[in-house]
Image (cartoon, rainbow, N blue to C red):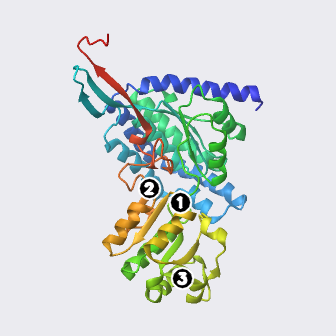
């Protein structure tokens, strides 16, 4: 596709999205929910077709010799497809944020001022191999009153198209414009560049979902605000007062439940005061589950199978069955390590000491901090948001899981009785 043709294609998507956003911003909750309920039903009725499309993507990925983590992110099965439909229905069940009053007050002159939630407008989502992003992003943007332009990766092309068709069926059945949720119909890399550099007249915000290279490019080239995170270098700190059985369960789940997600633990920190009781069993659990452990000298001494960690390991988001492990001097040592090496995503402390937990939760400056729970709970669905379109490590405009409320802004509605300032 030549540059002129691509520009016309992308501009047509942008203009259609702006027009659809105007309609969607005023759409009643019942109409949006009807579209989403119909989408969930369509996902279930088209199960075989969606799984067949996904099988094509997985087969192509295998031919490219994609790794296990990438295949895991790409693959759909009956359980995951049911989770897709259930996530859409969870969004239906959530309160509609649009039009809700955040705050209200009256001035001495009688003016009544309300701060009211409104949609952002048109959202651009650029993602790679996770096909469920298609429906998660589409559902959240629709419910929050935003039109969305989706640009999925070539590796999930057939899966994303099949799921997008379900969204279109839902929109049509509810009488909403099909342009409320559009999928860029080309996988040419130039389409991403055009979205970032030349669609400022149409897009109000861009959200990247993918690896470090994609996110870096989006943050570097975007001409509109970006919501997202660069890396998920997440930590689990096991404190001296941690219950050993609990610590073993949490560490193993945080690392190994799904290694390819951004909430997977990448670094294990162990309090020096519990090395003799906690370190060996936890490391043995990880190794026994097929996880490579890279540790400092103390961790290496606990098991001959542990490899030596390098300085770079403390910074690394593996997204694979690999974890870095270090012994630290209590909760303050853990806080200092996370402050130096962390990516401000998700960190957990395992402890029965309420004071240590409070210190950790207050002083660790990450988007999500947990006490006695796995970092794998860093997920909008697990937070009760129905779904998410990503985790933000920004301080503006959203932080943590990006759900319905995070996809809105606000305006001030002021009612008077004839007041003037003269």
Residue 247 lies in what quarter of the image? Answer: bottom left
Estimate the spatial distance between the alpha carbons at disc 3 and disc 2, rounded to whole Å: 27 Å
Task: Tell me the residue that label 2 is attached to.
Answer: 379
Distance in Å between CA atoms under marks 1 and 2: 10 Å
Residue 327 image point, x, y percent: 52, 79
Vertical position of residue 3 compared to residue 229: above or below: above
Q: Callout 2: few (<14), some (14-19), or many (20+) C-alpha neighbours within 10 Å?
A: many
Image location of residue 127, percent across then percent down: 59, 46
Residue 220 vs residue 265: left or right?
right
**Numbered label attached to residue 152:** none
Q: Position of residue 361 (x, y in %)?
A: 39, 63
Query: Which residue is disc 1 drawn over?
Result: 261
Q: Is the C-beta separation of discs 1 and 2 under 8 Å? A: yes
Residue at (59%, 49%) from the top-left corner? 53
| Residue at the spot of label 3 | 288
Q: Quadrant of residue 233?
A: bottom right
Q: Secondary structure at mark 2?
A: loop
249 or 413, nearer to the observer:
413
How far apart in space, not on screen, are marks 3 and 1 (Cα)?
21 Å
User: Around disc 1, counting alpha carbons within 10 Å, would you say few (fewer than 14), some (14 to 19), or many (20 or more)?
Assistant: many
Mark 3 residue element: helix
């Amino acid at each position: 596709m030549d540059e002129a043709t691509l520009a016309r294609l992308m501009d047509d998507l942008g203009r259609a999205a702006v027009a659809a956003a105007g309609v969607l911003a005023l759409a009643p909750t019942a109409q949006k929910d009807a579209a989403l309920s119909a989408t969930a039903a369509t996902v279930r009725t088209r199960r075989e077709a969606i799984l067949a499309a996904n099988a094509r993507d997985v087969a192509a990925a295998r031919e490219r010799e994609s790794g296990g983590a990438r295949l895991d992110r790409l693959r759909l099965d009956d359980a995951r497809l049911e989770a897709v439909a259930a996530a859409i229905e969870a969004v239906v069940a959530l309160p509609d944020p649009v039009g809700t009053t955040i705050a209200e007050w009256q001035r001495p002159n009688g003016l009544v001022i309300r701060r009211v939630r409104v949609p952002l407008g048109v959202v651009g989502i650029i993602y790679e191999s996770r096909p469920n992003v298609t429906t998660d992003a589409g559902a959240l943007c629709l419910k929050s009153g935003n039109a969305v332009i989706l640009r999925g990766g070539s590796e999930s092309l057939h899966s994303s198209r099949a799921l997008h068709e379900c969204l279109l069926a839902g929109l049509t059945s509810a009488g909403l414009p099909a342009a409320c949720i559009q999928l860029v119909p080309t996988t040419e890399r130039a389409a991403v560049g055009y979205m970032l550099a030349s669609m400022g007249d149409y897009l109000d915000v861009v959200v990247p979902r993918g690896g470090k290279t994609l996110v870096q490019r989006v943050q570097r080239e975007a001409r509109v605000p970006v919501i997202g995170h660069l890396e998920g270098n997440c930590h689990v700190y096991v404190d001296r007062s941690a219950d050993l059985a609990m610590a073993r369960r949490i560490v193993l789940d945080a690392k190994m439940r799904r290694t390819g997600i951004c909430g997977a633990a990448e670094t294990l920190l162990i309090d020096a005061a519990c090395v003799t009781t906690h370190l060996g069993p936890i490391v043995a659990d990880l190794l026994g589950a097929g996880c490579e452990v890279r540790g400092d000298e103390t961790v290496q001494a606990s098991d001959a199978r542990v490899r030596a960690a390098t300085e770079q390991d403390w910074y690394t988001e593996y997204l694979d069955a690999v974890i870095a492990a270090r012994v630290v001097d209590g909760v303050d040592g853990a806080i200092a390590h996370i402050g130096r090496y962390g990516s401000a995503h998700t960190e957990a402390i395992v402890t029965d000491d309420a004071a240590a937990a409070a210190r950790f939760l207050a002083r660790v400056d990450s988007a999500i901090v947990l006490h006695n729970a796995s970092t794998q709970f860093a997920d909008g669905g697990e937070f009760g948001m129905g779904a998410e379109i990503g985790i933000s490590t920004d301080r503006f405009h959203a932080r943590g899981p990006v759900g319905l409320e995070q996809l809105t802004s606000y305006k001030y509605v002021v009612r008077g009785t004839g007041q003037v300032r003269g």
